């Protein structure tokens, strides 16, 4: 038993860093094929190479629920992921929807080299990776070419300001096919001013919106992730409400009607009028 604990400690302490030293991959001592990606100490992605359907982070489970519900089970989709990390969600889509075609837009080449070396991407069928920023990468895509666009991009623990604007949302809508879905992971804290403005932004571009988050985050009691989905087609509010309420970590689902009140009086995010909230230093164990 002691040898097992020592082996787990050794595995947990074994880490590999990207060429620029910012990104680090660390083994999970409790899952043989589990890896945690951090960037400058901030957790970014978790991947289980043996089971890509295992979504360890609560917010990623909520994103996976949206992906599960927006199309019939197992139906292939075409998806664009703005922000790559360890490619957790692309791996999940490839495993649950065989035949899907996916593109990841990731500007950090050193991070991608680290991920490719330790967490191979060639085995993820239908996945292509482009080293480019999200704004330029989406702008280069043709009209009506994808079923899903995912925003899960963070720089220094905040979402890049140019990826949360009305201008970017309209470019995403251009890329989506009729009935396509825009799925965004953002973070906010007390007062939720940024989240309300982000909701107002998406409501001004798309006909239907929903929001998923843990109750404590929605009440502004703590800083955390909020998942937004937007589409010109109706979204599966009822099924996502059921899943959110019955998950290991319970969450709430707010549909378009509830979000009208949530975002009342909030100004859409436009151009340079963007202030992205910064998480408290203590959130990731930093004093």
Image (cartoon, rainbow, N blue to C red):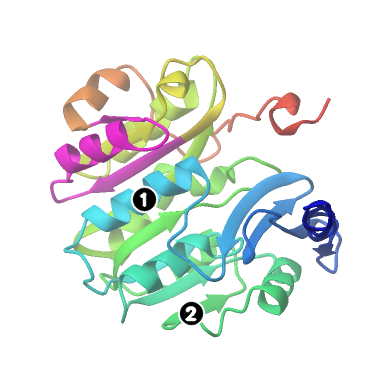
Q: Is residue 78 left or right of residue 218?
A: left
Q: Where does label 2 land, which residue?
A: 124
x 76%, y 31%: residue: 285
Would you say residue 84 is visible in this rendering? Answer: no
Q: Is residue 94 left or right of residue 39?
A: left
x 48%, y 79%: residue: 124
Determine whether label 2 and label 1 are within 8 Å by CB. no
- Element class at badge 2: loop
Residue 51, horizontal then vertical, whole percent: 48, 67
Q: Could you give the CA–CA distance between mark 2 and mark 1, rounded to whole angstroms?
A: 21 Å
Would you say residue 208 is visible in this rendering? Answer: yes
Residue 206, horizontal then vertical, whole percent: 23, 45
Instruction: Write down the quadrant of residue 13 in the picture.
Output: bottom right
Magenta residues (range)? 226-254
x 64%, y 73%: residue: 119
Q: Of 286 and 200, which appears nearest the observer?
A: 286
Instruction: Write down the quadrant of residue 101 in the picture.
Output: bottom left
- Element class at badge 1: strand
């Amino acid at each position: 038993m002691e040898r097992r604990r020592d082996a787990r400690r050794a595995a947990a302490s074994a880490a590999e860093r990207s060429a620029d030293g910012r990104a680090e991959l660390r083994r999970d001592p409790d899952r043989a094929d589990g890896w945690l990606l951090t960037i400058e100490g901030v957790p970014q992605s978790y991947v289980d190479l043996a089971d890509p359907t295992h979504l360890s982070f609560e917010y990623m489970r909520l994103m996976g629920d949206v992906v599960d519900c927006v199309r019939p089970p197992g139906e292939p989709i075409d998806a664009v992921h703005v922000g790559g990390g360890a490619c957790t969600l692309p791996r999940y889509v490839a495993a649950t929807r065989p035949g899907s075609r996916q593109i990841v837009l990731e500007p950090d080449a050193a991070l991608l080299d680290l991920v490719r070396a330790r967490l191979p991407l060639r085995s993820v069928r239908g996945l292509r990776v482009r080293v480019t920023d999200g704004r330029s990468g989406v702008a280069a895509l043709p009209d009506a070419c994808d079923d899903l666009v995912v925003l899960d991009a963070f720089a220094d623990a905040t979402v890049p300001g140019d990826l949360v604007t009305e201008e970017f949302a309209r470019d995403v809508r251009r890329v989506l096919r009729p009935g396509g879905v825009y799925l965004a992971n953002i973070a906010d804290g007390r007062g939720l001013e940024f989240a309300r403005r982000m909701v107002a932004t998406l409501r001004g571009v798309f006909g239907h919106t929903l929001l998923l988050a843990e109750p404590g985050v929605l009440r502004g009691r703590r800083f955390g992730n909020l998942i937004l989905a937007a589409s010109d087609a109706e979204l599966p509010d009822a099924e996502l409400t059921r899943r959110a309420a019955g998950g290991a970590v319970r969450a709430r689902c707010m549909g378009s009607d509830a979000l009208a009140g949530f975002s009342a009086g909030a100004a859409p995010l436009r151009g340079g009028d963007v202030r992205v909230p910064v998480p408290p230093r203590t959130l990731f164990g930093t004093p």
